[in-house]
Image: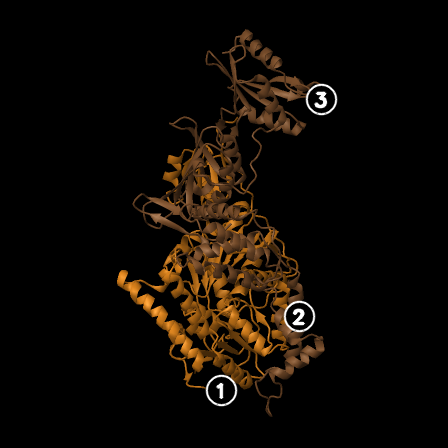
Chain colours: A brown, B orange
């Protein structure tokens, strides 16, 4: 991630928007070749010092005098993020300093020209130390501060797959940096809310879920203390959340920014903005069993029941439960279906505890049971469909029909 | 369930209270700022109100389950705190009398740390010490080990070792307080003028500690936020001014200003750069009256002319910082004080390294590891190193063994920084007078910064020598 000092954005007071710096192919056509040359500096830069690499990157931008300083510095940071600098220098440099300063201490002060009072000239002392350590003075002075960050040497550069990847990373990184100043964000989501909620939880954010007017869900994300006052404290969490959000589909995001004394500005973003995340997209289905079951059921209703994937959020406070499927009957009746593949007794217990919070909804629990032992005894309060290798459509239909028969609502 | 027994718990830096309507809480304790949080189904407030809230609920005879852990008691084994001076004892007493909450203002070098250690010893409760930078954090660790014979935990500098007595930095405290805030009974803010930043203050707000102590030499902040310390820590319970202790607890001191000149080539480059900067500045002011350099440096979209001007500005400052004659003057001063401990303060890391390279004396910079730093300071204390150079790491409170000569060859103009630097050489030892040299480039910004440094009352009425005093 970038730091605040590398963050570059424009406040559009007319429209009330914060617009992070974004490079695109139309308006910044030259950047693809610039990015390629920046990568080249690092690829060919093994063994060179960080400061030299940065100087070279700055040099490349001489061609574009209108380029803001922060953009150049941001690129240096992103390149450094994927670079490996030598670290063993640290001890060596500290040891070298100890030796050099230790030798010189007795001869303090080192004077330019020796005289009767002070007989140690800097030049003599350097020669003396050089002999004592059996190293060239040039070599000593080159390495005396090798552990200072600017002087670190590049060891290798795993880098970015290509110039486009670097530019995509830049665009996302600038939004992340702008989000440091966010106090709350709201995500409207159609289908992908399960992954969005999971990403929010990983970023340690709290959510408030409601139905959106436009259909779908509206998820407001803040931190615990946000309810007491507007705080930028959770800006880092929002920034951490963003790359995972970008992996999701069908969403719109609005961040409320803190703007000292001025009316609140907003940062708007959506899945249609064409941003690319550096994170690998996580699997659409949690497990192959679910994908397999959905394929078997098909798009068409069976016995009047249609299978919808992850179409419901059950939420109470910070507890949420998104069942794998919703079975919707043509009469409008809805039954939830959750498939549990691999499990341990603790996992199952925790799942059941979550479900007990939502006890007024109907849930079918399909549990994989290699040996088909007495699972029902361990799981109370939910209807269980045990299965062995794969969940059969027939077993689920039977359970649904059984429900109809028993006359549940 | 028993008929809605209320419960109070600590949650990520806040208090959560269930079972009492928020309207009632507003009536009972209007100052606490309770808010109903429907995400959690409970009332929420800042954790710093813990003691106040508990006392109020008990006073109203509300039955509630208190899930906030009771602050752990600490048993010291063989403490060895040196005897306190009269003003130190008065400070401890004043803090106790204000119910264990408040700030103590004492000049650098008058033993704030001993006051805090005595308070820790007497309070005997789990304690978190918050220091501005990691060097100071380690120094607190050492002092607690030395005086209270306790190996404190460390939270910061990539270490996360939480013990009943721990030390941390403001930045780490702010980040980790949501998970630490209910584990300490006493929280100490060293150099507490750092606390009132908009986010940093969470270090105090998110802590449930009932006992709070702030230490500083200079309470006031230029943004006026020091007024908030009263709510975050407590009132100022004791204040000792620097003029009251001059010559008593502290050594007396002289300030000597040494003007140096840029070399001919430096002067030429300096003038070219200065003109470039001024031209830009003039044009910017035409467009926007009152435009300042701070604005330029802060503005995010520096490009084109501004980018070039900014570069010229930095280059110009670098010439001031690293003027060749400064090194020559330094040699003169080292000759003059060849047998005394000298600390040099440089204006930049680069200049600090220049000095280190030229005189082969150790330099304390942020890249130094803990061990190296310790070694340098110990070497300086034992007299093995007669001179060391530093940039900012020594700015605040770092215990530097009785140096009598400080040489400032660059730096910012803020009066607090200057005062703290001055404090460094004022440590009490014998009756020698301390000397602070300021080496300043004539006819540059350097000179102006020096004037700003002196504006503070501390410098007034001090004997001054003039001119090149060395040789």
Secondary element at tag 3: loop
Nearest the eye: A256 or B373: A256
Secondary element at tag 1: loop
Q: Is residue A183 left or right of residue B284?
A: right
Task: Tell me which chain the residue with mark 1 is part of.
Answer: B
Q: Nearer the viewer, mark 1 or mark 2?
A: 2
Q: Is residue B161 left or right of residue B425?
A: right
Instruction: Give coordinates of residue B20: x percent, y percent.
Output: 43, 33
* Residues indicated by labels 3 and 2 sit on the same polypeptide chain: yes
* Residues indicated by labels 1 and 2 sit on the same polypeptide chain: no
- Mark 2 = which residue? A96
* Distance between the alpha carbons at the discs numbered 1 and 3: 90 Å
Where A135 sits versus A87, above or below? below
Neighbours of disc 1 within 10 Å: few (<14), some (14-19), many (20+): some
Instruction: Give coordinates of residue A364: x percent, y percent.
Output: 57, 18
Neighbours of disc 3 within 10 Å: few (<14), some (14-19), many (20+): few
- Mark 1 = which residue? B470
Nearest the eye: B5 or A332: A332
* Distance between the alpha carbons at the discs numbered 3 and 2: 64 Å
The answer to whether one can see residue B333 in this image is yes
Residue visible at 41% across and 79% down?
Answer: B267
Nearest the eye: A134 or B272: B272
Q: Nearer the viewer, mark 1 or mark 3?
A: 3
The answer to whether one can see residue B33 in this image is no
Q: How many marks?
A: 3
Task: Tell me which chain the residue with mark 3 is part of.
Answer: A
Instruction: Give coordinates of residue A291: x percent, y percent.
Output: 59, 24
Name the disc covering residue A370, or none.
3
Where A351 sits versus A125, above or below? above
């Amino acid at each position: 991630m970038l730091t605040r000092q590398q963050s570059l954005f424009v406040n559009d007071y007319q429209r009330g928007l914060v617009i992070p710096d974004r490079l695109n192919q139309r308006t910044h056509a030259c950047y693809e070749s610039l990015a390629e040359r920046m990568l080249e500096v690092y690829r060919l830069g093994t063994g060179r010092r960080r400061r030299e690499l940065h100087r070279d990157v700055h040099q490349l931008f001489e061609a574009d005098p209108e380029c803001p300083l922060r953009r150049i510095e941001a690129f240096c940071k992103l390149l450094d993020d994927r670079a490996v600098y030598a670290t063993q220098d640290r001890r060596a440099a500290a040891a070298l300093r100890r030796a050099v300063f230790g030798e010189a201490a007795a001869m303090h002060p080192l004077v330019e020209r020796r005289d009767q009072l002070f007989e140690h000239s800097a030049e003599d002392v350097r020669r003396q130390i050089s002999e004592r350590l059996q190293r060239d003075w040039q070599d000593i002075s080159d390495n005396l501060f090798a552990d200072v960050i600017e002087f670190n040497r590049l060891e290798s550069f795993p880098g970015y797959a290509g110039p486009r990847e670097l530019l995509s990373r830049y665009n996302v990184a600038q939004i992340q940096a702008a989000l440091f100043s966010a106090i709350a964000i709201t995500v409207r989501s159609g289908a992908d809310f399960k992954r969005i909620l999971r990403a929010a939880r990983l970023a340690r954010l709290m959510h408030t879920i409601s139905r959106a007017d436009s259909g779908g869900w509206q998820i407001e994300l803040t931190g615990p203390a946000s309810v007491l006052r507007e705080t930028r404290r959770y800006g880092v969490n929002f920034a951490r959340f963003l790359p995972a959000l970008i992996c999701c589909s069908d969403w719109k995001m609005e961040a409320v920014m803190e703007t000292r004394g001025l009316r609140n500005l907003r940062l708007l973003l959506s899945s249609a903005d064409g941003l690319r995340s550096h994170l690998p997209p996580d699997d659409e289905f949690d497990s192959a069993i679910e994908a397999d079951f959905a394929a078997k059921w098909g798009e068409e209703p069976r016995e009047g029941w249609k299978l919808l994937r992850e179409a419901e959020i059950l939420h109470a406070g910070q507890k949420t439960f998104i069942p794998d499927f919703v079975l919707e009957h043509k009469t409008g009746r809805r039954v939830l279906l959750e498939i549990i593949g691999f499990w341990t007794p603790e996992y199952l217990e925790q799942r059941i505890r979550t479900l007990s919070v939502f006890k007024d909804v109907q849930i079918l629990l399909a549990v994989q049971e290699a040996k088909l032992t007495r699972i029902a005894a361990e799981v109370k309060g939910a209807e269980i469909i045990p299965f062995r290798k794969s969940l059969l459509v027939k077993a689920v239909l039977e359970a649904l029909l059984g429900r109809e028969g028993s006359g549940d609502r | 369930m028993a008929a809605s027994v209320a419960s109070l718990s600590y949650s990520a830096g806040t208090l959560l209270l269930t079972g009492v309507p928020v309207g009632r809480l507003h009536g009972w304790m209007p100052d606490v700022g309770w808010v109903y949080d429907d995400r959690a189904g409970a009332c929420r407030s800042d954790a710093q109100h813990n003691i106040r809230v508990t006392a109020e609920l008990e006073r109203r005879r509300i039955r509630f389950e208190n899930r906030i852990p009771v602050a752990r008691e600490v048993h010291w084994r063989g403490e060895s705190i040196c005897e306190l001076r009269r003003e130190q004892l008065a400070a401890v007493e004043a803090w106790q009398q204000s119910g264990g909450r408040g700030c103590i203002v004492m000049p650098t070098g008058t033993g704030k740390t001993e006051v805090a250690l005595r308070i820790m010893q007497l309070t005997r409760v789990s304690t978190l010490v918050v220091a501005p930078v990691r060097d100071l954090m380690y120094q607190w660790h050492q002092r607690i080990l030395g005086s209270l014979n306790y190996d404190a935990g460390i939270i910061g500098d990539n270490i996360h070792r939480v013990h009943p007595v721990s030390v941390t930095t403001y930045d780490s405290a702010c980040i980790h307080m949501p998970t630490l805030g209910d584990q300490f009974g006493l929280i100490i803010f060293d150099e507490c003028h750092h606390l009132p930043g908009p986010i940093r203050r969470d270090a105090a707000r998110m802590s449930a500690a009932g006992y709070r102590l702030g230490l500083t030499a200079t309470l006031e902040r230029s943004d006026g936020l020091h007024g908030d310390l009263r709510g975050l820590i407590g009132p100022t319970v004791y204040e000792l001014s620097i003029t009251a202790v001059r010559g008593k607890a502290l050594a007396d001191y002289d300030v000597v200003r040494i003007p140096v000149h840029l070399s001919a080539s430096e002067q030429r480059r300096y003038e070219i750069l200065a003109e470039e900067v001024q031209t830009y500045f003039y044009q910017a002011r035409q467009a926007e009256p009152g435009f300042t350099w701070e604005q330029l440096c802060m503005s995010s979209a520096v490009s084109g002319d501004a980018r070039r001007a900014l570069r010229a500005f930095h280059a110009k400052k670098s010439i001031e910082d690293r003027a060749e004659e400064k090194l020559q003057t330094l040699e003169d001063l080292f000759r003059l004080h060849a047998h005394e401990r000298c600390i040099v303060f440089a204006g930049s890391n680069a200049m600090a390294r220049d000095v280190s390279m030229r005189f082969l004396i150790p330099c304390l910079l942020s890249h130094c590891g803990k061990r190296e730093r310790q070694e340098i300071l110990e070497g300086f204390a034992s007299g093995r190193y007669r001179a060391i150079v530093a940039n900012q790491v020594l700015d605040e409170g770092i215990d530097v063994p009785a140096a009598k000569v400080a040489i400032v060859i660059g730096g910012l103009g803020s009066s607090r920084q200057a005062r703290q630097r001055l404090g460094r050489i004022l440590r009490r030892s014998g009756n020698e007078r301390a000397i602070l040299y300021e080496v300043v480039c004539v006819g540059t910004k350097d000179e102006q910064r020096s004037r700003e440094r002196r504006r503070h009352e501390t410098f007034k009425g001090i004997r001054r020598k003039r001119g090149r005093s060395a040789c």
